[in-house]
Amino acid sequence: MTRFASAAAIAAALASVAAFDAAAAPLTNTLFTRPVACAVNKSDGEALKIRILVTNTTGQTIKQGTPITLTIRYRTGGPELRTLTIKQDLTVYRDVYAGNVIGFDQPTGSLSCTGRVSMGIDKSRLTPHKLTH
């Protein structure tokens, strides 16, 4: 057997083992993003400073450690005033139940913001759909 043929045989064997291992793995979460309400220059009652408040409008609990992305428009000073946009990737530091709020620090001169949270679907809780003919 040539080197190429033996290498191809080994690669094929390893690929089938990897496919079997992946098929036996537990079902994982699928991530998707959902919008959340976001407001600047607010006080959340927890911190003694003005912050960005994010309201959980997803209808689900956002668990601690969940990634959240805020897109913030802010105004900068200098010889001419400019409006810029910054994107911040943050992590939720506590559980946020549906309808509750969580506060994050904001840049100076914040004007507005939008937010999206990464949520997951637990595939192990889904039931398979049976087709009938």
Image: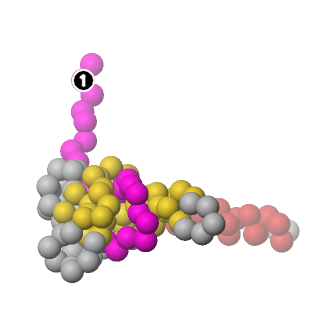
- The quarter of the rendered structure image containing the N terminus is bottom right
- The quarter of the rendered structure image containing the C terminus is top left
Identified at 21% across, 69% down, the residue is: 43
Q: Is residue 18 above or below residue 60?
A: below
Residue 84 falls in image quadrant = bottom right
Q: Is residue 9 visible?
A: yes
Depth order, front residue of 15/111: 111
Q: Is residue 107 above or below residue 27?
A: below
Residue 65 falls in image quadrant = bottom left
Identified at 21% across, 56% down, the residue is: 56
- Residue reaching furthest to the top: 133
Query: Magenta includes 94?
Result: no
For label 1, the SS is loop
- Residue reaching furthest to the right: 2
Left or right of residue 24, residue 131 in this image: left
Identified at 19% across, 63% down, the residue is: 101
Query: Magenta includes 106?
Result: yes
Left or right of residue 13, residue 86 in this image: left
- Residue reaching furthest to the front: 79
Depth order, front residue of 29/33: 33
* Spot occupied by residue 38 in the image (x, y as percentages of width and height): 30, 56
List the residue tagged with mark 1. 132
Mark 1: amino acid = Thr
How crowded pointer 1 is (Cα within 10 Å; few <14, some 14-19, many 20+) is rated as few
Specify the segment rendered in magenta. Answer: 104-133
Q: Is residue 125 visible?
A: no
* Spot occupied by residue 62 in the image (x, y as percentages of width and height): 23, 63
Left or right of residue 110, residue 47 in this image: left
* Spot occupied by residue 117 in the image (x, y as percentages of width and height): 34, 58
Identified at 18% across, 55% down, the residue is: 60
Residue 31 falls in image quadrant = bottom left
* Spot occupied by residue 119 in the image (x, y as percentages of width and height): 31, 57
